[in-house]
Amino acid sequence: MALLNANYLGLYAFADSGQTSAYRVVDNSSLSTAKTNFLSAAANGEYGLLVNGNDLWEDTGSVPAIGYDNSSAWANAAGSLDLLAAATSTTLDMNNSIDEVVAKSTQCNSETYIVGGAQAWSLSADGLIQDTISGSQMGATALMDIARASEYVIVRFVLDVTDKDTAGTNENQVNYIGQGIIENVSLTGGFDDTATYSVTVRGYGKLYRYNNAS
């Protein structure tokens, strides 16, 4: 057993679609049926996620089932997920609202029960602003432009960027994927200081678990 290195945490974002409406989510216990149902409902060029309950399907090629309608054919787009450039800290938050119910048990007595309510999740990252970035990374200004356009993004939180596509269910091989909107993005710099950015994505709908099971 080994502790996970915080430097291996990763937050990937998918924003190439320019989509200002929520991504279509199709839930089915069969991947092939999910693809068929997605294509029958989606417009050409529309993006979506294929899920099975609380889990994201693994698509052909051992990648998450994130894709779009390409002239009535399913096209996987998971390879377009870009790593946020030079993130120095990454956080995934999940909250369950708790509803309290008081029920009468016996005469003049009552009991208190709690039940789960709505879930809410968010992803955030802080990092350094670089003058140049590689083609597989997303720059701070790209995040600002996505926020300005009020576009939806798909995010992928991984515990170990070196093992995100490795087969297995160990902690370092688990991914969490969902869609959301950039709630806040800040670009900060001071005189003779390193320029930094911070971004928060507010989740829309469920947060799905994904791991390469092949």
Image: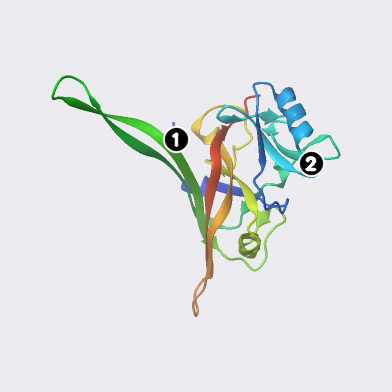
Q: Earlier in the sequence, mark 2 or mark 1?
A: 1
Task: Identify the image quadrant of residue 108.
Answer: top left
Residue 4 visible? The answer is: no
Please state the total of marks drawn on the protein image.
2
Amino acid on which disc 2 is placed: Ala
Of residues 82 and 76, the one nearer the viewer is: 76
Residue wearing tag 1:
2
Name the one closer to the observer, 58 or 192.
58
Q: Nearer the viewer, residue 66 or 10?
A: 66
Lateral position of residue 67 relative to residue 90, left or right? right
Q: Is residue 10 left or right of residue 71?
A: left
User: Residue 37, how many percent across, how many down?
Assistant: 74, 28
Q: Height in image: 25 above or below 155? A: above
Point out the image quarter for the N terminus.
top left
Residue placed furthest toward the right: 71
Secondary-structure class at tag 2: loop
Q: Percent from the top left, x then y, of residue 32?
A: 74, 24
Q: Residue at the location (65% across, 57% down)?
A: 138
Q: Residue furthest left?
A: 108
Q: Residue furthest top?
A: 106
Q: Quadrant of the C terminus?
A: top right
Q: Is residue 39 above or below residue 182?
A: above
Q: On the image, numbered disc 2 is attached to which residue?
A: 43
Is 71 above or below relative to 169? below
Mark 2 Cα-neighbour bin, 10 Å: few <14, some 14–19, many ≥20: some
